[in-house]
Image: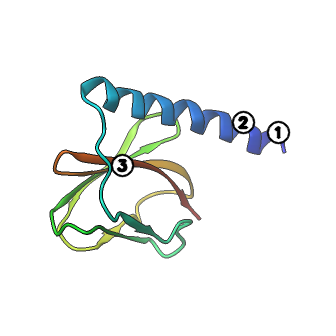
Amino acid sequence: MKKQYFYFIILLLSLSSVTGFAQAKSPDQPIEGLNFYPNPVSNGKIYISSKSAMDKDITIFDVLGKKVLQATVTAKELSIATLSPGVYIIKIREGEATATRKLIVK
């Protein structure tokens, strides 16, 4: 229980620092119709879609705020097979719109 609580606190601190940085630039606009699945991930792939067909810039951070993956998705599929199991923060940017979510890799 203590270990889960510790990870939860780190996640909250990381999420606030990642979103705080994005908000310092400009207020976030939501991505219309964003769909991000599966979460938790066990097959090494995630699928990201929205109402727009625009490319999506993806940045994934570990719980300490270190960037561990950066990619541009032109289709729906993104391979995250290189990520170790754990909790991550994923930032999705589509044009001027952004979204930040928690990603769990099993």
Q: Answer yes or no: do the residues labelled 1 and 2 have beta carbons within 8 Å?
A: yes
Q: Residue at x 49, y 72 (%)?
A: 38
Q: Which quadrant would the C terminus be assigned to in this image? A: bottom right
| Outermost residue, top side | 24
Crowdedness of circle 3 by 10 Å Cα count: few (<14), some, many (20+)?
some
Residue 63 in the figure: left or right of residue 56: right
User: Tag on residue 46?
Assistant: none
Residue 98 in the figure: left or right of residue 1: left
Q: Is residue 31 above or below residue 2?
A: below
Per the model, the C-alpha gap separating discs 3 and 2 is 25 Å
Residues 60 and 101: in front is 101
* Residue at numbered disc 1: 2
Per the model, the C-alpha gap separating discs 1 and 2 is 6 Å
User: Tag on residue 6?
Assistant: 2
Per the model, the C-alpha gap separating discs 3 and 1 is 29 Å
Q: Which quadrant would the N terminus be assigned to in this image? A: top right
State the image coordinates of residue 61 (x, y, percent, origin top left): 42, 43
Crowdedness of circle 2 by 10 Å Cα count: few (<14), some, many (20+)?
few
Q: Amino acid at mark 3?
A: Ala
Q: Answer yes or no: do the residues labelled 3 and 2 have beta carbons within 8 Å?
A: no
Q: Residue at x 56, y 66 (%)?
A: 40
Who comes first in sequence, dot 3 or dot 2?
Answer: 2
- Tag 3, which secondary structure? strand
Q: Amino acid at mark 2?
A: Phe
* Residue at numbered disc 3: 99
State the image coordinates of residue 30 (x, y, percent, origin top left): 32, 49
Residue 94 in the figure: left or right of residue 65: left
Q: Answer yes or no: do the residues labelled 3 and 1 have beta carbons within 8 Å?
A: no
Residue 85 in the figure: left or right of residue 97: right
